[in-house]
Amino acid sequence: MKMEEERGLTRIGVSLPSNLLSKFDTIIGGRGYSSRSEAIRDAIRAYIIEYEWMERESGDEIGTVTYIYDHSQRGLGDKLTEVQHHFLGMIKSSTHIHLDGENCFEIIVIQSDAKKIKELTENIMSLKGVKHVKLTTTHGGI
């Protein structure tokens, strides 16, 4: 990745699928951003805030991990099943939905220590072919 320092900013190159960039451009145009860079900086800040929030969480949590993945990605279904089996004690329920010929959507209802939930979520995020992951939790003792 080519990086260059320029007036306190670092320039990077990012490879994206054209449909993802097109959708991003449509959204940032509608939200009034003056440039892609400004929108990408905001997106990165939001990601960092969410990650730092997850890092601070502790204790018993209940919630969902939702994700979309490419079911045609070789071996991905088996890997996702292995991850769920590794965390079996914390999984209360899961639902699998076929969205179209390529994409599947899964919802996993979880209850466990926040650190274990984070570990499960990161295991899913790290798999090639997983397109989107969203973790939503609340304290289990409420």
Image (cartoon, grey):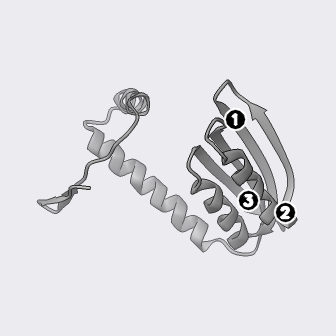
Lower position in the chain sequence, tag 2 or tag 1? 2
Left or right: 90 with respect to 74? right
* Residue under numbered circle 1: 104
Which disc is residue 88 wearing? 2
The crowd level at tag 2 (other Cα within 10 Å; few <14, some 14-19, many 20+) is few
Lower position in the chain sequence, tag 1 or tag 3? 3
For label 1, the SS is strand
Left or right: 67 with respect to 12? right
Q: Is residue 136 above or below residue 87?
A: above
Q: Nearer the viewer, residue 109 or 78?
A: 78
Residue 126's image quarter? bottom right
Residue 10's image quarter? bottom left
For label 2, the SS is helix
Lower position in the chain sequence, tag 3 or tag 2? 3
* Residue under numbered circle 3: 83
- Give the image location of residue 89, x and y in percent: 87, 66
The crowd level at tag 1 (other Cα within 10 Å; few <14, some 14-19, many 20+) is some
Q: Is residue 76 above or below residue 33?
A: below
Name the quarter where the N terminus is drawn.
bottom left
Q: Nearer the viewer, residue 38 or 11?
A: 11
Using the rendered image of the protein, determine whether residue 142 is visible from the camera's viewpoint. Answer: no
Left or right: 94 with respect to 119? right
- Residue at the spot 80% in from the left edge and 68% down from the top edge: 112
Label 3 – label 2 distance at C-alpha: 9 Å
- Give the image location of residue 130, x and y in percent: 59, 45
